[in-house]
Image (spheres, rainbow, N blue to C red):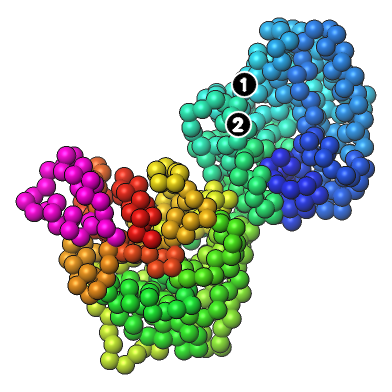
Amino acid sequence: MRTSIATVSLSGSLTEKLTAAARAGFDGVEIFENDLLASPLTPEEVRARCSDLGLTIDLYQPMRDIEGVPADEFARNLRRARAKFAVMNRLGADTVLVCSSVSPLAADDDALAAEQLARLADLAQDFGVRVAYEALAWGRHVSTYDHAWRIVETAGHPALGTCLDSFHILSRGSDPKPIEDIPGEKIFFLQLADAPLPAMDVLQWSRHHRRFPGQGGFDVAGLLRHVLRAGYDGPLSLEVFNDVFRQAEAGPTAVDARRSLLVLQEELGLGSLPPPVVPTGVAFAELVTPDAEPVTSLLGALGFARTARHRGKPVELWERGEARVLVNTGPATLAHTRRGSGGGTATDGTRLAAVGLESPDPAGAARRAEALLTPVLPRRRAPEDAPLDAVAAPDGTELFLCAPNAPNAPNATKGPQPPHWRADFADLPGIAAVRDGVRIDHLSLTQPWHHFDEAILFHRAVLGLDAQESVDVADPYGLLRSRAVSTADGAVRIPLTVGAAPGDDTAHARHIALGTPDVVAAARRFTEAGGRLLPIPANYYDDLAARYEFADGELATYRELGILYDRDAHGVFRHCYTRTVGRVFFELVQRDGGYQGYGAANAPVRLAAQHTAR
């Protein structure tokens, strides 16, 4: 189906918005009146610009508070409408959006509303324009789609139809199934938006917190299914009011928007994408650093051994159990120097810059990523290097798609396995890693503030990971928001967070969580090797004693080592943290009894301790 996006969903000038929409692959745009009024281009020049970019102007949005008003007010409305329809002719737009009135002058009189909308449609028809009437969720008298449709049906004018907006319908909890009873030819336009499910005034919710489909809690796909069954054959258009999107770069936002529609169409069987290839594990985490000594000392204290060196690059492999960390002292790549949320370029200090994901079909995973508008990164490699595919996550993190480390792991291609990344490394003589139960339990990736929702959709749609519920955590300097994505079996777990303080290095540090069968023993070995764990305030342990019962000496051990404790319906979680090196720290975790979370209840204490320990 054709796709469209409202200019209000993107940041920048009208020209920048149109360019971003076209580059992202949209077929058309809805032009918001304010964007035209603020543009130095004439309507004819906007029309020509859209034509050059291959965009149609599918909707114009200048009409408010039209219907159900006193006669003298309606006369003024018709005068204004005549001028706007003339502008639409200059733009080459043939459909105008009319939202249900919020005016205090509007009367609760459906017959009057239908009569005035029919007169408006008469005037519109003279200009070759159609009127799409939409129920605003906060409309004064008309606030539901079925009410708006009854008025349109009563008016009975060929140039008058309805516009359906997923936000206005789903935010009110309306049943979308009766949409199927509306004749498809009378659904003049469809606007799609998702949203989280907060408790707030619906107008504030609509104007500031909409998301692209797949980024919120609405069943947008279910609503679209009903609209298509009604016979609608117009464009799928996005109208998303969001404060973050309006401050972020228009280009990446448009790509994210287009990706959301590709995934939505896939869900309904309307598009053909390469199938998702869900990763089966974490092959490695790669740290980039200008000075290897602090991080390698930390790895050594954690029990890692330097087991191999890359044959052609300044990269060393450190291993313990099934956990593998690459330490790269080479120059930062383009992906590594993407501008961060603090407004600067993050090239200083040690950073978690890349992740290797084991995949049963790396080439298939790369094909899906590319089909979903994800950059497949060029790699500088020697002829003998393993031909690894790498894609860029929204925050610039490189994600390498690797053949599984296990030689007998599932191979989705049923053919020969591609060369293994480990073959690029030469073993160091006489050094072997400890083979114990340590593994990478999860990778916590802090996101730039303007990429958080994009990152959720990317990890779900491109990598096939499941998204858990969003969690808000109190930080000493604001609110930290987190949402984890993972495989069903927990082999890959990635909590995505957006920090509270945009310019603060500690808030934006990323971390590697190492799973161990005995966190107390692991913490003792770390401190005995000279490592420093994050100190936790005594008040925290006093609170633990009030909330839980512990075996004799258990809580004293946790207090001594700085181990935090949490429970959920499945089991128990014990964890502790190292000091931060650059923008990276490590976490030691022990999951017992099927614990599913990440210790979110302890995050405020951990964040406060990190701020204090800087």
- Hey, which quadrant is residue 75 in on the image? top right
Q: Amino acid at mark 2?
A: Ser
Q: Secondary structure at mark 1?
A: loop
Q: Residue furthest left?
A: 552
Instruction: Find residue 138 and name its label.
Output: 1
| Residue 15 x %, y % | 81, 49
| Picture residue at 31% right of the left edge, 93% below the top | 429
The residue pinned by badge 2 equals: 206
Q: Nearer the viewer, residue 83 or 551?
A: 551
Q: Residues within 10 Å of mark 2 (few under 14, many from 20)?
A: many
| Residue 446 x %, y % | 47, 56
| Picture residue at 18% right of the left edge, 62% below the top | 520
Q: Are marks 2 and 1 in contact (CB under 8 Å)?
A: yes
Q: Nearer the viewer, residue 402 or 73?
A: 73
CA–CA distance in space, label 2 to label 1: 10 Å
| Residue 310 x %, y % | 45, 85
Is 118 left, or right, of 502 in this rendering? right
Q: Which span is picked out in magenta?
A: 534-563
